[in-house]
Amino acid sequence: MTAELPDWMVPPRPSGWEAGDLDHLPQAPRHTELIDGALIFRRSPQRSWHSRLVENLTFALRQSAPAGFETEREMTVRLDKKSRPEPDVLVATAAYDPDRTWYAPEDVALVIEVVSEESADRDRSLKPFKYAQAKIAHFWRIED
């Protein structure tokens, strides 16, 4: 038995998805990431611990960051043509733009990943490597 994929889940090219494609997928679930041309969906409900930690970090960083730094929750970073991960929190030097859907790595000063069971592998190995490759200076990983 072969499961049929909805049309929107089929990549528009044989080489897979590209970073700009995420802005044209209104049917994709919230928090969809792109890693090496593959769509990544959050598979399980978020724990209260994770949600509160992300909320409190976002608030604390917004209150304490110096002028010229913006703190965002769950915004993607366009690392390259095929990768657009969504850190739990980021701090960027780009000015606030209400229509922004992603940040460029050169505008990101800090990314924070709060590890959950379903994302542990990516948060511990793949994402730190990808952020470092993109020359993002600071990466925090928070474990329960």
Image (tube, rainbow, N blue to C red):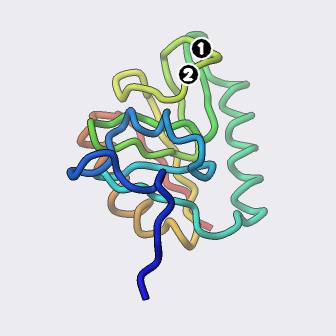
Q: Is residue 22 above or below residue 14?
A: above
Q: Is residue 40 left or right of residue 127?
A: right
**Alpha carbons under labels 2 and 1: distance apart:** 5 Å
Q: Quadrant of the C terminus?
A: bottom right
Dot 2: element? loop
Seen at 41% across and 69% down, the residue is: 121
| Coordinates of residue 122 in the picture (x, y in percent) | 41, 62
Seen at 50% across and 45% down, the residue is: 86
**Dots 2, 1 in contact, CB < 8 A:** yes
Seen at 34% across and 62% down, the residue is: 125
Q: Which residue is mark 2?
A: 100
Q: Which residue is mark 1?
A: 97
Q: Splitting the image into 4 quarters, where does residue 97 fall?
A: top right
Seen at 59% across and 68% down, the residue is: 43
Q: Is residue 79 above or below residue 65?
A: below
Q: Residues within 10 Å of mark 1 (few under 14, many from 20)?
A: few
